[in-house]
Image (cartoon, helix red, strand yellow):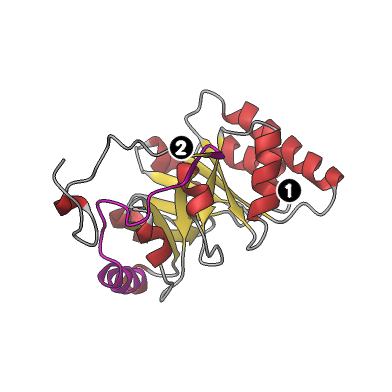
Amino acid sequence: MRFLPLIPSSFPPEPWLSLTPLMLKWDGLVHPGWSLAARRGLAIHAVHLPGGAPAEEGLEVLRHGLGADFLVIPVGRPETREAGFRLLGHLETLLEATSGRGVKLALCMEAGAEGPLLDLLRQAQGEAVGFCWHPGIRDPEPLADRLWCGICEPGSDLRPLQALGYRWDMALPAEDPATFRAQAAALGAAHPPVLFPAQMPTTALGRPVVPDDAVVFGRHLLPDGHGDHS
């Protein structure tokens, strides 16, 4: 997987330009250099929102034209039916605002809230919304079909993701480039890239996966080395 710096949006971009693509943590302010750098082709992979007012925060980010691929929205367990409807309203507003812009929404779900939130999205047919992993999610398999990004800390255990074959982008909060480089190198050494999952997904888009008995992995593709070359 690829480790990317997650930088407060009020930080100036110049010290980070050699580390693109990168991610921004929205702190309510945006250094004017980010919008200029984005217009010049700087790759901002994602903007992580605080989550207090997702629609307002997301619309403000879009107004600055940062060219991000993802808006990452932290969400908790909807404790009431009304809370669930409010969340769906925020997501609908942002989906309409991002339509045609190439920006996707990824939910960073509170640990333990995965089941209720997946049920809510399934009932609302919210297949356009994906997910952002974090270390509090012990079992990422139910999210695997729409797991678009992640966020971790130095020393995080990324083996649950590796078991699923995850090899995309992982945000690492950063304060200065030198520290980020050292921390990213340590994480990369502890969690080398994987090509194939050790654990095949059992669900896709919220539905059970039906194995195809006609498909058999060759011996060289299986993590434990067992299998044939059919």
Q: Is residue 64 visible?
A: no
Q: Is residue 103 magenta?
A: no
- Label 1 belongs to which residue? 53
User: Whole-percent x and y of residue 58?
Assistant: 63, 42
Q: Residue at x 23, y 62 (%)?
A: 224
On the picture, is 146 further left or further right than 214? right
Q: Quadrant of the C terminus?
A: top left
* CA–CA distance in space, label 2 to label 1: 21 Å
Residue at the outermost bottom position: 155
Q: Residue at x 56, y 40 (%)?
A: 206
- Label 2 belongs to which residue? 67
> What kind of element bears circle 2?
loop
Foreground: 171 or 14? Answer: 171
User: Whole-percent x and y of residue 189?
Assistant: 25, 71
User: Whole-percent x and y of residue 22?
Assistant: 39, 53
In the image, the segment drawn in magenta is: 180-207
